[in-house]
Amino acid sequence: MSEKSFVMLKPDAVSRRLVGKILARFEEKGLQIVAVKLLQISKNLAEEHYGEHKDKPFFNSLIEYITSAPSLALVIKGDDVISVIRKIVGATNPKEADLGTIRGDFAMDMGRNIIHASDSLESAKREITLFFKENEVIDYDISD
Ligand code: CMP
């Protein structure tokens, strides 16, 4: 069944000009972009998005990094979208991520792991609502 996930290309992806290469991986796999927004994330939005990590030792540096330069927020639609996207993205620690995954191919540092993807449909709904208004997500179908 087709569902939606939230994906964010972090500041490194944008400043290293990797946006096109990364989006191509999702499109070539057969997933569909249904919303996209380049934005400078505010401290408030970053703290809300990463609220579950607020007691972690890396929280402050995570917020500082994510607000340091523009990010690209996306909603991506497809069958089994959460698990398919997480396979394409790779393990959280880029040093452990398999080659062929986005983190495995483009990143080295846990704090700069280049991309975020929702870990469940519940988080996806919460994250999509945080970053997008309802009318910014275009629920169209494309025939194969
Ligand atoms: P992300 O998928 O965006 O979700 C939370 C982020 O916190 C994660 O990617 C990493 O960038 C960051 N993170 C998780 N664990 C650590 C850690 N041990 N040290 C630094 N950053 C971390």
Image (spheres, rainbow, N blue to C red):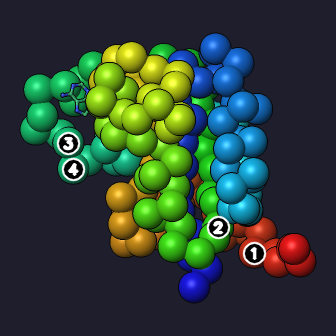
Q: Which mark is residue 52?
A: 4
Give the residue at mark 2. 77
Q: Judge the density around disc 1: few (<14), some (14-19), many (≥20) Cα neighbours within 10 Å.
A: few
- Comparing marks 3 and 2, which lies closer to the viewer? 2
* Among the 4 quarters of the image, the one containing residue 66: top left
Q: How many marks?
A: 4
Name the foreground residue: 141 vs 84: 84
Do the residues under discs 1 and 2 have CB atoms within 8 angstroms?
yes
Q: Residue at x 74, y 42 (%)?
A: 24
- Compared across the picture, whether 54 is left or right of 48 comes to left
Q: Residue at x 44, y 63 (%)?
A: 83
Q: Find the distance from the CA under tag 1 to the CA under tag 3.
A: 31 Å
- Comparing marks 1 and 2, which lies closer to the viewer? 2
Q: Find the distance from the CA under tag 1 to the CA under tag 2.
A: 9 Å
Residue 41 lies, with reference to residue 67, above or below; the image says below
Q: Quadrant of ligand 1?
A: top left
Percent of width and height locating residue 3: 57, 76
Q: Judge the density around disc 3: few (<14), some (14-19), many (≥20) Cα neighbours within 10 Å.
A: some
